[in-house]
């Protein structure tokens, strides 16, 4: 915010006074600049550029209010609109959707305690999904706007490509001229937003610096707080091999700029190309299934809501330099889909609930200082119990999932409040708690991700129970 308020556009992506540089696309930078004008009225010191962070009660109030207001404006309306698309939707479905989104423990911890604007981004995504039913071109426009607000969502571009191509094919009714005309309309909408976003960057000669900030390929494939994905297992395996000298090791230099995890010792670091390739290969079956689904339905929103979640879960597992918070983007739309379309499928519902709550556990590492490190357990526990009560889950039937989650929560609590302070800190093992916490959450998250992936790609055509996708 201080960068965009104090500096001209041509310096936004070069500014390095603080370690918190601008690494978001241009539309989010505009949003931060707009917040800056409001912050200037509230407390001008918030906008002073400095190496050290500035924090007062006024700062706290401003950040909290800005998060709450933006979420109410951007997140609540799309949820209401999506819920109203289902003709037989009950009022309870709307309330549950709002609860599982706005009061999602991960979103509360990241946005309302850690002060980020993921709710704003999710609101834009849900709006673009809602628009797929009747306004495909407008949906494409909003989705493009989203990508230039948070570039991570470019991973969903293949889904929108399939949706828009399918729409153009169906509308053309086999007439090439009509197909070309429809395609050009979509293309012009996407290019117009893209041009508006990129033009200031090109004019100011920032294009290379812009992409280097958004896609820091020189950094490690693992964020400095490892996300609960497959790469955590890879990194821990490297540490164990080095610790016990199981194979000859050498240092693999990975990050010449000194960012985050600096090297792998025994096994080669994973390159960005591999991450991109495995994501694409994993998403292709989702796209193929989506094409066949869209060819048989009039309203595409339902399928896109689910496939967006699945694609984001895949990216969370295989993407390059993934942040732990990015699983929120997958869980929130999955919750709305489950409540509206799969609430009567007990297994689907239960698996969503446990994926959601394991995700909450994995994100708790972000909050390390007192009293946040106590509050986070209260938030996660309250959210978990609320979901069990609201959805009337049969704990006897799913006792294994419940017991495993309680056991995992207990172990993480013990690691943080006992071993971390009594053992890890004294031995200067700063990140061991983060690594172990991520490791504990990795296996359940991977299991539930695999379930939803298989459920969509393979079971939808073969099992009458899961044939709900085509309805």
Image (cartoon, rainbow, N blue to C red):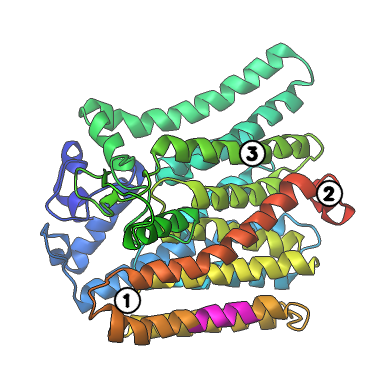
| Residue wearing tag 1 | 368
Residue sitting nearer the eye, 406 or 343: 406
The residue under the point 44% across, 41% down is: 147
Q: CA distance from mark 3 to mark 1?
A: 44 Å
Provide the residue span drawn in magenta. Answer: 403-410
> Residue 337 at x, y = what percent?
68, 58
Question: Does residue 466 appear left or right of residue 29 in this picture?
Answer: right
Residue 455: x %, y % from top left: 74, 53
Which quadrant would residue 215 be assigned to in this image? Answer: top left
Q: Nearer the viewer, mark 2 or mark 3?
A: 2
User: Where is 45 relative to 213, above or below?
Assistant: below
Q: Is residue 430 visible?
A: yes
Q: Position of residue 332 (x, y in %)?
A: 57, 61
Q: Is residue 180 above or below residue 460?
A: above
Q: Residue at x 35, y 59 (%)?
A: 239
Question: With 241 as the anchor, is 307 left or right in this view?
Answer: right
Compared with 430, 48 (above or below) is above
The residue identified by callout 3 is 135
* Relative vertical location of residue 356 with respect to residue 394 in this rendering, above or below: above
Q: How many marks?
A: 3
Task: Report whether 204 appears left or right of 329.
Answer: left
Q: Earlier in the sequence, mark 1 or mark 2?
A: 1
User: Which residue position holds label 2?
Assistant: 471
Pointers 2 and 3 in contact (C-beta within 8 Å): no
Q: Earlier in the sequence, mark 3 or mark 1?
A: 3
């Amino acid at each position: 915010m201080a960068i965009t308020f104090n500096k001209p556009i041509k310096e936004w992506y070069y500014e390095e006074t603080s370690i918190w540089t601008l690494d978001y696309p241009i539309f989010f930078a505009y949003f931060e600049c707009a917040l800056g004008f409001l912050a200037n009225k509230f407390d001008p010191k918030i906008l002073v550029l400095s190496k050290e962070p500035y924090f007062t009660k006024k700062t706290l109030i401003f950040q909290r209010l800005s998060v709450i207001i933006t979420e109410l404006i951007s997140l609540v309306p799309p949820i209401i609109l999506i819920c109203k698309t289902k003709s037989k939707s009950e009022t309870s479905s709307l309330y549950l959707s709002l609860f599982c989104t706005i009061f999602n423990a991960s979103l509360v911890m990241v946005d309302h305690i850690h002060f980020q604007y993921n709710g704003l981004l999710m609101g834009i995504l849900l709006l673009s999904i809602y628009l797929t039913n009747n306004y495909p071109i407008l949906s494409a426009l909003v989705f493009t706007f989203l990508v230039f607000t948070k570039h991570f969502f470019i991973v969903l571009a293949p889904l929108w490509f399939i949706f828009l191509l399918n729409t153009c094919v169906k509308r053309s009714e086999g007439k090439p001229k009509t197909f070309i005309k429809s395609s050009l309309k979509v293309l012009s909408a996407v290019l117009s937003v893209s041009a508006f976003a990129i033009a200031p960057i090109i004019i100011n000669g920032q294009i290379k610096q812009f992409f280097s900030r958004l896609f820091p390929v020189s950094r490690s494939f693992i964020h400095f707080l490892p996300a609960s994905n497959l790469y955590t297992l890879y990194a821990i395996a490297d540490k164990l091999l080095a610790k016990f000298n199981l194979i000859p090791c050498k240092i693999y230099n990975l990050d010449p700029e000194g960012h985050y995890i600096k090297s792998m010792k025994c096994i080669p670091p994973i390159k960005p190309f591999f991450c991109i390739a495995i994501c694409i290969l994993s998403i292709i079956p989702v796209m193929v299934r989506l094409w066949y689904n869209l060819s048989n339905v009039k309203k595409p929103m339902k399928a896109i809501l689910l496939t967006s979640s699945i694609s984001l879960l895949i990216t969370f597992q295989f993407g390059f330099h993934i942040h732990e918070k990015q699983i929120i983007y997958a869980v929130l739309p999955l919750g709305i889909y489950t409540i509206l379309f799969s609430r009567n499928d007990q297994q689907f519902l239960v698996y969503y609930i446990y994926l959601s709550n394991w995700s909450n556990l994995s994100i708790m590492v972000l909050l390390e200082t007192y009293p946040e490190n106590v509050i986070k357990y209260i938030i996660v526990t309250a959210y978990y119990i609320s979901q069990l009560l609201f959805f009337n889950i049969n704990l006897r039937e799913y006792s294994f999932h419940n017991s495993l989650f309680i056991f995992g929560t207990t172990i993480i609590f013990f690691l943080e409040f006992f071993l971390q302070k009594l053992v890890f800190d004294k031995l200067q093992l700063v990140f061991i708690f983060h690594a172990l916490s991520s490791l504990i959450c990795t296996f359940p998250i991977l299991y539930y991700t695999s379930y939803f992936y298989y459920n969509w790609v393979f079971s939808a055509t073969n099992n009458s129970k899961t044939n709900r996708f085509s309805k």
